[in-house]
Image (cartoon, rainbow, N blue to C red):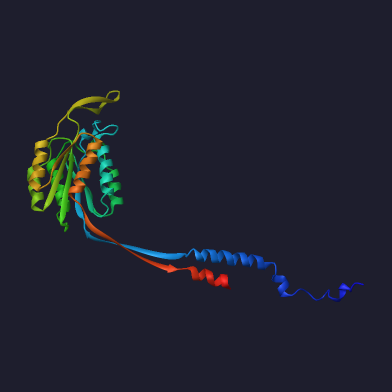
Amino acid sequence: RYADTRLVAGGGRSWRARLRPLLGGARWLALALTVVALARPQASEARQTVEGEGVDIALALDISGSMASLDFEPQNRLEASKQVIRDFIAARPHDRIGLVIFAQAAFNQSPATADHAVLRRQLDQVKLAPALGLEDGTAIGLGVANAANLLKESRAKSKVIILLTDGVNNAGEVDPLTAAEAAKALGIRVYTIGAGRPGQVPVPVPGIFGQRMAYQESVIDEATLEKIAEATGGAFFRAHDTAGLAQVYDDISRLEPSRYEIRVFERHRELAGWLLGPAIA
């Protein structure tokens, strides 16, 4: 009634039978490859070129002891100024910017550079003159002179110094107006900023039992700062707090726009064929 199965026991399985379990998986793989191919995958390459003329800027920052005043609360004047300057640098990505610091003497903290990451690191290292072991004082003339020297080799059509101070010129061998005339001869405009609230301001001073708070009169030589700016075709600004200081830098940024054009080139390669081929196979 039944055939003897021993007749086919040694026949083995065909390759069709062996591969049949893979057929379902292959169908799902082909479907997946087709769906991804329909999404039109691409390999893209983009290139950006900047054409135009930026502005070369030298930032001259007062680091005298009076910049420790806390009228720009919750920070002192120096830390508030550094934060505003960081934002100013970030808003001008195509300009070459350098940094000069001054107290009784002036120092080049950073040359004019388009590498703003390095510039920001140099700015972060700036401290008050006493903390850096420097003699205290306010050499505005030296600050302008060093900043002008920083830009003297510049070939930019627009060269600018932005000087921030909270005091009166009381140090240095260079008269501020003489330095302004030198900057003018080099084709450099100087914008001056007087930072500080008028009247009595809180200043931390060292005492027997540690730091204590004292109140000192805030005096800024506005007349000299105005003359420096006027002599070079710049402008004088007054800032009483952090918000006012940020507004001053915004105003200067609008007065000195960077003229540049950004062109973006993109190239795309279609990758769908690399998926449809295996799917069809």
**Residue 245's spot in the image, x, y percent?**
22, 39
In this rendering, is residue 25 above or below 206? below
Task: Looking at the picture, tell me which residue is in the foreground, 111 or 93.
Answer: 93
In this rendering, is residue 185 above or below 28? above
**Residue 232's spot in the image, x, y percent?**
9, 47
Q: Residue at x 57, y 64 (%)?
A: 32
Quarter of the image for the C terminus: give it.
bottom right
Q: Residue at x 23, y 51 (%)?
A: 97
**Residue 239's spot in the image, x, y percent?**
19, 36
Task: Looking at the picture, tell me which residue is in the foreground, 55 or 20.
Answer: 20
Q: Is residue 175 visible?
A: no
In this rendering, is residue 235 above or below 37? above
**Residue 206's spot in the image, x, y percent?**
26, 27
Q: Is residue 245 visible?
A: yes
- In this rendering, would 225 be left or right of 21? left
Quarter of the image for the N terminus: give it.
bottom right
